[in-house]
Amino acid sequence: MLFYDSVGPNPRMVRMFMAEKGVAPEKATVDLRGGENRQPEYMAKNPSGQTPALALDNGMVLAEITAICEYVDEVGKGPSLIGATPEERAETRMWTRRIDLNIVEPGAAGFRFAEGLKMFQNRIRCIPHAADDFKLIAKENLAKLNKQMEGKTYVCGERLTMADILLFAFIDFFNNVGQKLDPANANIAAWFERMMARPSAAA
Ligand SMILES: N[C@@H](CCC(=O)N[C@@H](CS)C(=O)NCC(=O)O)C(=O)O
């Protein structure tokens, strides 16, 4: 397997997931800032022109971080980070989708349309005047999630799952690009420290 890696929270999320699952493919670093990911050679592998991607030994190329993680979960070692039963798997996917749609996507749009505008303006449609609103949507949804995390060790209770790793990679990224976690979100702040202490956080 070959992992197309780069800077940014999306590859980082998959690196952390792979570290948890003991999966260590060869890596090729894609120059995201230089736009290598938008050149024909890379687009032939992943037509969405984004990182990461995982090229399998049979020639297939997987993209989209949660899809890559689902694959890694099945081929990797140790307990599943999706779930052991239909109920657990559905619960993980439910929270992953909520976090993706309600926090990751609006927060990422807020970044792309403001701090990241210079890099993204010639790559995707950017709406600079909507940046603050997108950031606010992510912030409000984080506050809601904070309440829902009351009494829980992880997003799905006592189980570490893909939902935690997704949320962690993006909160860590947002913290560094002007969307710092509001410390009033005490449940998420405590959870964040637990996640940061995992060796996989360094991947
Ligand atoms: N929906 C994609 C998002 C991937 C993504 O946005 N990757 C970023 C890196 S963190 C990227 O490639 N940005 C550069 C660009 O879009 O040109 C996924 O799940 O993998």
Image (cartoon, rainbow, N blue to C red):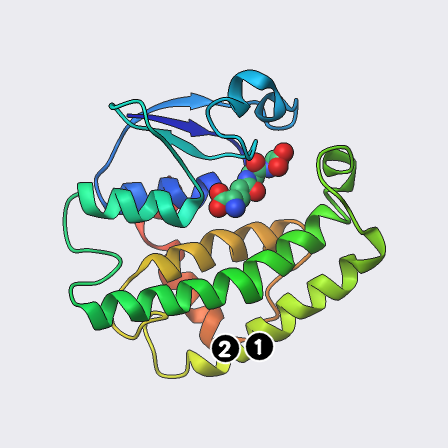
Instruction: Give 40 or 176, whichever is nearer the viewer.
Output: 40
144 left or right of 135 in image: left
Crowd around label 1: few <14 · some 14–19 · many ≥20 (10 Å): some
Residue on which the image places disc 1: 143
**Could you tell me which residue is drawn at 24 percent across and 48 percent down?**
73
Q: Position of residue 83 (x, y in %)?
A: 22, 63
Residue 72 visible within the image: yes
Quadrant (top left, top right, bottom left, bottom right) of the N terminus: top left
Amino acid marked by disc 1? Ala
Q: How many marks?
A: 2
Amino acid marked by disc 2? Asn
104 left or right of 122 in image: left
Looking at the image, residue 140 lies above or below residue 32 = below
Residue on which the image places disc 2: 146
Looking at the image, residue 1 lies above or below residue 102 = above
The picture quadrant for ligand 1 comes to top right
Q: CB atoms at circles 2 and 1 under 8 Å apart?
A: yes
Q: Position of residue 85 (x, y in %)?
A: 16, 67
Looking at the image, residue 65 lies above or below residue 107 = above
How far apart marks 2 and 1 lie (CA) works out to 5 Å
